[in-house]
Image (spheres, rainbow, N blue to C red):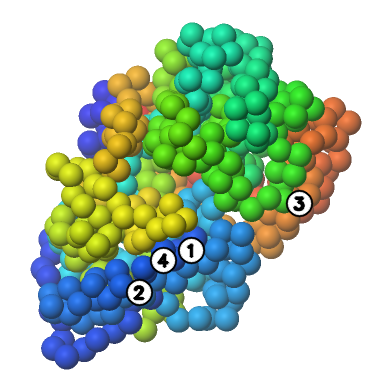
Amino acid sequence: MKKLLLLALALVLALPAFSFGAVAEGEVHPMRYVQPGTLPTEYDIGIAAVNEKLAADGLGIEVEIIRIPWGEYDTKLNLMLSTGEPFELIHVMQDVKNMSALAAMDAIVSVDPYLDNYPDLVSKFTDTEWLGALYNGEHYAVPCSWRTFDNTMSYLDLRVDVMKAVGYDEFPSEDLDAVFDLMKKSQDYILEETGLVAYNWFHQNQDTAHWLHRTYDSYPFYVENSLGLVLARQDGTIDSFYESEEFKQDAEFYYKLYQAGLVNPDVLNLDHSVMYDDAQLGAFLPSQTFDPATGVTIKRLTGIDTTVDWVSMYPDKPEMIYTFVQNLNAISATAEDPESGLKFLNWLYANQENHDLFHYGIVDRHYTPIGDNKIEQVRGDDDNALYVMDTWMSGYLPYMRFAADAPERQIEYMTYRAENYVVSPIAGFIFDASNVQTELSALQTELIASIYPIKVGMIPYEGNIEKAIDNLKAAGLDTYLDEYRKQFAAYLEANPWVLEMAQ
């Protein structure tokens, strides 16, 4: 029934018939694409080849990738948006600065006025993926279908060799005390092995401990990931997460981890990249990030013969499908030519050749194809690929290639489709924060100051949560939640299939 209901979502979109829009001869428009991260060493060479191919194909656009380093991403992006800096395309991460936040700031525009010209682009994505791009009844971005999202909210990645070395033949999926013991013993083992202290990590500091939620009697439920303010239950009830029993359980377990030295003591101040730098040298505990390919990187950099795998607490419990799309690409409100971004995406997803050229560079200079879906990348002295554009921002799963030494478990991880699952009722809901922008800004600041130290275990839940909640309420928590509930109720009324699908 659930799968039939997902297929029935096509009726919600009712996308029109399409005809391709012509490009005026001789016109060349910039297509500046804003992304997080840093550019690869041979970016100039790779992007020149991309632009040569775009010109040969008569697209009339010239691509430039603008990268903002992770440690400065939020500050610099906000500055670009506030000053009206011109660019055409922006990558949208629903767990960092989501589409509704950007749309509410008038930073991005609806793509609906232009989609008629790009039928091939529209057809590349499922109806449910397009549903994830809706905001106030219009599509405000193009989905990025670079992996499935059936298992990304409830897993841990761990080093299997370390797990076995410290006395566990398999992951203790129904015993949190044993998981704690595994983490402690693993830290001692990895310190002896690498000289580095390994820690448990969230994927981002704003993330929630979704892996723990599978252990609670109240599961399944989903905590909205960009702020963690909203706890959505399967019956459509919207609760205040930081006031919930579930958050108390999270905080108490992470306090135990932090006090035992299993969470980095400076976790709230470190650059996002630190966890990955250490993990690539083998130093990480079971964590809500990384992937099986990390094991290959560890072996290449250190010689340690390791295997990384993903595991879940209570694996017989259903997976939580929490979103129809996690990553998107949107047209900037400051675009010189709003259609240039869509022209580029339409070209990018048109065929394997274009997808390979943009993401992996020039054959034999930057990579060598191996079989149907693997490549050997050419790396510099720093072990980074000479040229690569991250597929998690602009990749298309049917065209994706994997490292030549990628384990099959990594490919399964990317393409996995759950058979036992529930769909969160907020999976297709996009909150419009425009009526609570003042509260949203204040809450974002207050969460970092008051809630994060409790969430990561720096300070105990008891004796601190009351003041933290008072601070959130002073910042506008109740107003924010009231607006969320109001909009979500209207969404449910307009889409009565949602709650049936969630059961």
In this rendering, does residue 332 appear at all? Answer: yes
Badge 3, how many Cα within 10 Å: few under 14, some, many 20+?
some
Location of the N terminus by quadrant is top left
Between marks 1 and 4 in the image, the one whose residue lies nearer the viewer = 4
Between marks 1 and 3 in the image, the one whose residue lies nearer the viewer = 1
Q: Residue at x 75, y 44 (%)?
A: 266
Q: Amino acid at mark 2?
A: Asp
Q: Amino acid at mark 3?
A: Glu
Q: Which residue is mark 4?
A: 41
Instruction: Name the one closer to the observer, 47 or 427.
Output: 47
Query: Label 2 vs label 3: CA separation?
Result: 41 Å
Disc 1 secondary structure class: loop
Disc 2 secondary structure class: helix
Q: Which residue is mark 3?
A: 446
Disc 4 secondary structure class: loop
* First along the sequence among labels 1 and 3: 1
Q: Which residue is mark 2?
A: 44
Quadrant hosting residue 193: top right
Count of picture labels: 4
